[in-house]
Image (tube, rainbow, N blue to C red):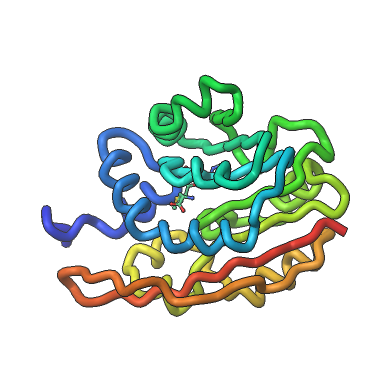
């Protein structure tokens, strides 16, 4: 049974899928702490170039979005997240970039992306594919909005990494990176594993957590 110290894993799973209500603030803080190393890894692979159009799907708090702009001039960055709480928080956090018209954040779902076809050079998502029960529809949309030869990056943790968290028993799709490569291969992409490394150990009251981050790089064929 859940106690104040040990929240209900079912509730955590639902909040990670779509942060909402009062809990969204606490869940967002936790996501920031746990997922910063993965954002860093994805950014190393993605490495934006000047004048590109980039989309992040499921940006959560958006705390690290500003890092995309370092070293690449005239970037146009968009973000879509279906949690209004996260869009509000990320907009507050990035107010200067939003006001300058360099960052565009909106509520929306990856199953129905509000962009014209062949608009983006790169699309990425970190810790989102666990919630794609039927990935094909999401991937078809991402394929549509990418320019020919554009890249889609998936930032994720290995299955063994995720199994350390009790909440993954509640609705998480836990494919290995190799399985995602095969799914992307059937969805009009050529996919390779671009980077993999262990995060710094996370010290929790219940014991240390060792997460292995992976970034897949899928090119639109
Ligand atoms: C586990 S959080 C990860 C947040 C952030 N990317 C990170 O690495 O910390 C998943 C985020 O993706 C959003 N999300 C999940 N599925 C989505 C979908 N199909 N379309 C848009 N946003 C989605 C959720 O609202 C949530 O903010």
**Figure quadrant of the N terminus:** bottom left
Name the residue at 50% across, 76% down. Answer: 197
Residue 97 lies left or right of residue 88; in this view the side is: right
Relative to 211, say whether 153 is above or below. above
Relative to 24, say whether 210 is above or below. below
Residue 85 x %, y %: 39, 32
Q: Nearer the viewer, residue 128 or 123?
A: 123
Residue 4 x %, y %: 11, 53
Q: Nearer the viewer, residue 171 or 34?
A: 34
Query: In this rendering, does residue 57 appear at all?
Result: no
Count of picture labels = 0
Residue 30 lies left or right of residue 43; in this view the side is: left
Relative to 124, say whether 89 is above or below. above
Name the residue at 30% across, 47% down. Answer: 29
Residue 203 x %, y %: 23, 71
Relative to 76, say whether 128 is above or below. below
**Figure quadrant of the C terminus:** bottom right
Name the residue at 70% across, 55% down. Answer: 152
Residue 131 lies left or right of residue 48; in this view the side is: left
Quadrant of res 63 = top left
Name the residue at 44% across, 25% down. Answer: 95
Query: In this rendering, does residue 169 appear at all?
Result: yes
Q: Residue furthest top?
A: 99
Residue 165 x %, y %: 34, 69
């Amino acid at each position: 049974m859940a106690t104040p110290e040990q929240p209900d894993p079912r509730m955590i799973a639902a909040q990670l899928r779509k942060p909402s209500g009062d809990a969204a603030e606490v869940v967002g803080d936790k996501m920031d702490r746990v997922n910063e190393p993965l954002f860093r890894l994805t950014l190393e692979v993605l490495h934006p170039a000047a004048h590109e159009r980039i989309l992040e799907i499921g940006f959560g708090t958006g705390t690290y979005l500003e890092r995309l702009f370092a070293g690449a001039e005239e970037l146009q960055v968009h973000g879509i997240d279906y949690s209004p709480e996260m869009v509000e928080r990320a907009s507050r956090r990035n107010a200067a970039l939003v006001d300058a018209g360099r960052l565009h954040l909106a509520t929306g779902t990856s199953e129905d992306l509000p962009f014209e076809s062949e608009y983006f050079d790169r699309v990425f998502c970190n810790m989102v594919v666990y919630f794609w029960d039927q990935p094909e529809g999401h991937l078809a949309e991402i394929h549509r909005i990418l320019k020919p030869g554009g890249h889609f990056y998936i930032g994720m943790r290995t299955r063994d990494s995720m199994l350390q968290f009790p909440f993954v028993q509640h609705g998480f799709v836990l494919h290995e990176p190799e399985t995602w490569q095969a799914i992307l291969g059937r969805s009009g992409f050529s996919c390779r594993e671009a980077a993999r490394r262990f995060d710094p150990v996370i010290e929790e009251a219940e014991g240390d957590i060792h997460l292995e981050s992976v970034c897949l790089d899928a090119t639109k064929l």
